[in-house]
Image: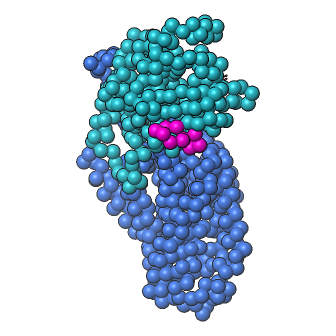
Chain colours: A blue, B cyan
Amino acid sequence: MTILRPIFYLALLALIIAAPFLAPDFKTQLATLWLFIILSMTWDMTGGQMGYNSLGNILFYGAGMYVAAVVGISIAYNVGEYTNAFGGGTYKFTTTEYFLGMGLGLVAAGLFCSAIAWIMGYLLFQFRGPYFAIGTLGAAIAAGELVSNWEWVGGGQGIALPVYPGDFDTGKFFFYYLFAGIGVILFIFLRWLYNTRFAAAINAIRDDEEKAEAMGLHTLRYKQVTWAISAFFVGIVGGISGYQLIHFEPLETAFQTINLGIFMVVCVLLGGKGTLWGPIIGAILFHVVKEVTWNYLLGWQWVALGALIVITVVYFQDGLMGWLARLKPEWFGERVITKPGPVAEPAE
Amino acid sequence: MKIIEVHDVSKSYGGVKANTDITIDVEKGGITGLIGPNGSGKTTLFNSIVGYHPIDKGSIKFEGNEISKMKVQDIARLGLLRTFQQTRIYGDMNCVENMLISLPHRKMTLREAFTTNTREDHERAEHLLDFVGLHEKRFLRSGSLSFGQQKLLEFAMALMNEPTVLLLDEPTAGINPTLINGLIDRLKRANSEFGITLFIIEHNMRVIMNMADRIYCLAHGELLAAGTPDQIQGDQRVVDAYLGEH
Ligand SMILES: Nc1ncnc2c1ncn2[C@@H]1O[C@H](COP(=O)(O)OP(=O)(O)OP(=O)(O)O)[C@@H](O)[C@H]1O
Ligand SMILES: [Mg+2]
């Protein structure tokens, strides 16, 4: 078991690196798969590990997309003029400007989203259950409306970013590896995080927040930190998506509450909340089902997707991982030490 | 020295006067008892002390500082901890995990929270589980334990938190009578060895008379009597209050 683990991870890493060569026609789909995986893993940090089901994490995706774009443009041009001309033909970016702008943009996107998550958390974490969910959804919808009325960032038309300054196919490789890189970093980070005292504390908040308060945990601070970390990664991948898509709109692309905003929740439910692998497995499953239904069930894809959600919620509430945990509890560390002896005798 | 001073505290729920003008003190380093018939307002008083709800009137001091307007977590972080009458543990986690979560976060910086538990943390968790007699069950889902065992786990968790004062709401409820002597012994040791001041709500007279230095008796939300176990046992008002209720 202990020897198998490094081998498993090395093989997995090799597969991740080789994937765009093995399936060259699916590079963009594979990049999107990584996006789903990252959004699911970050959603699970609050939804699964901490018990706060956000329906508004898409806000960070959209905000990240805009911040990365605006910062990326601003290193070369005046943003207002650029968006007014809708990218236009006159606005050329050198290769350096493109990558420097994107790099700075992604960092800024991550930090900006962390900051808004911190502030939103301060306001919203006093609500629990459905109130928190609706509150976050409302915030995401409001953010989309706000941005779509803001002419400086292109209003309802959105923003057109420069295209990748290499050949088309290299660009696809580039975005695949960018998403995959963030995904791998996030996975390694969460694998470490979920073994810390901090993770135990947010699990405690999920299981009985009142008890956690009574034990003196810094519940609000821990909740804000968790959401801020989660939003940091969402903001970055939102930024990457913007550059990958080249053109994006506020409501349909950036703040797409009913598509991506809900998909990430469904992925986690499918795979199993509150586990490291559940969101990943769920995202893969969901992405495959979605691609297949979109291609073969023309017109019925939403029905099929809806049915999948209903089946998950009704029959597999704990997702695949939860189902496994019930089937094979010993894989998940449950055991009794059967040493004979009374339970509460004085230990004199 | 008085570590908790409750002065003239009242609390009502709508029309129900759960506590009326209660004045009591808890001595540092001792074991103080709180008794009274069902519904006499004992749990309400605990809730008032730990900041679970705002009080209508009066003052509550901990180590000389007013705490009656503070929030639950801030009070807990002063080292004033409580267990629940209804018992609250993290049912989906095993006993060791329950213990590790109970590490004193008030003594922890955010940076320290981002570390894994040390070998000493694990040893302390196991030691305290052994102390309450739950060592064999340590890797079992705590929700699957019996009510009495969950009480013991909650007690161990409280000890893990290294409180200065521990308020225990009926620690022996649901504990098998043959095991109660063992629990009394452990409570006394928590007090004498770990130096934790105890304030205990208890229905079992034998238990509380055996442990407490000083006992307060509530009836109908008012303070009926206060004194040493001997004084309380001989107090006709206390006897009447209990007989009248049952
Ligand atoms: N949250 C509440 N809302 C309304 N009334 C309450 C509430 N909590 C307690 N009460 C009432 O306040 C009074 C005192 O209740 P409390 O729980 O403090 O009694 P107690 O002494 O702890 O009783 P027991 O020994 O049964 O635990 C009771 O009449 C009870 O019905
Ligand atoms: Mg009570």
| Quadrant into which the N terminus of chain B falls | top left
| Residue A48 versus residue A229 in the image, above or below | above
Number of callouts in the render?
Answer: 0
At which x and y percent is residue B79? 44, 39
A233 relative position to B59: left or right: left
Residue in the picture at 52% in, 37% down: B61
Read off the magenta span: B61-70
Residue in the picture at 28% in, 53% down: A7
- Tell me if residue A196 can be seen: yes
Between residues A101 and B177, which one lies in front from this camera angle? B177
Between residues A20 and A181, which one lies in front from this camera angle? A181
Residue extending furthest toward the right = B15
Residue in the picture at 70% in, 63% down: A142
| Residue A2 versus residue B40 in the image, above or below | below
Residue in the picture at 52% in, 55% down: A224
| Residue B167 versus residue A172 in the image, above or below | above
Residue extending furthest toward the front = B1
**Is residue B63 part of the magenta span, yes or no?**
yes
**Is residue A192 part of the magenta span, yes or no?**
no
Using the rendered view, name the quadrant where residue A15 is placed.
bottom left
